[in-house]
Amino acid sequence: MSLNEEQTRKQYIDIALKRSGWNKIIPFKEGVFYKDEAVEEYPTDSGPADYVLFCDGKPLAIVEGKKVAVNPQNVLQQAQRYARTFQNSPFT
């Protein structure tokens, strides 16, 4: 059975994030200060990132989910574009 991207995110990535201590996985809302959450569909200049992980109010990591059949190397440039949109962050 082939899972689509949304199914992959819910069945694999959300579970992996929670096991890693990211217990708050929340959708993006304009004007909210994110302290220690995994934020879904966080807007960037290159489009929405599937997840941005915030620690102490700063972006720590970007997680890009794809269906299982997609090779991770195929989306590396996409993740790098997302990372460049954060000014004064560990991504730049």
Image: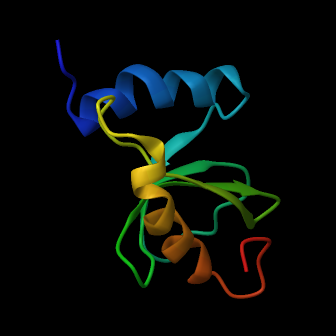
Residue 3 percent coordinates (x, y): 22, 24
Where 63 sits versus 68, above or below? below
In the rendered image, the vertical position of residue 56 relative to residue 7, given as above or below: below
Q: Which residue is at a point 42% across and 85% down the rendered structure image? A: 45
Q: Position of residue 27 (x, y in %)?
A: 41, 52
Residue 27 in view (yes/no): no
Q: Quadrant of residue 2?
A: top left
x and y, in percent, of residue 74 in the image: 39, 53
Name the foreground residue: 53 vs 82.
82
Q: Quadrant of the N terminus?
A: top left
Q: Can residue 32 be seen?
A: yes
Q: Quadrant of residue 21?
A: top right
Q: Quadrant of the C terminus?
A: bottom right
Q: Is residue 36 above or below residue 34?
A: above
Between 67 and 37, the residue placed more toward the observer is: 67
Give the residue displayed 48% in from the left and 50% down from the top. 73
Q: Quadrant of residue 88?
A: bottom right
Along the horizontal axis of the image, is 39 left or right of 70? right
All told, the count of numbered labels is: 0
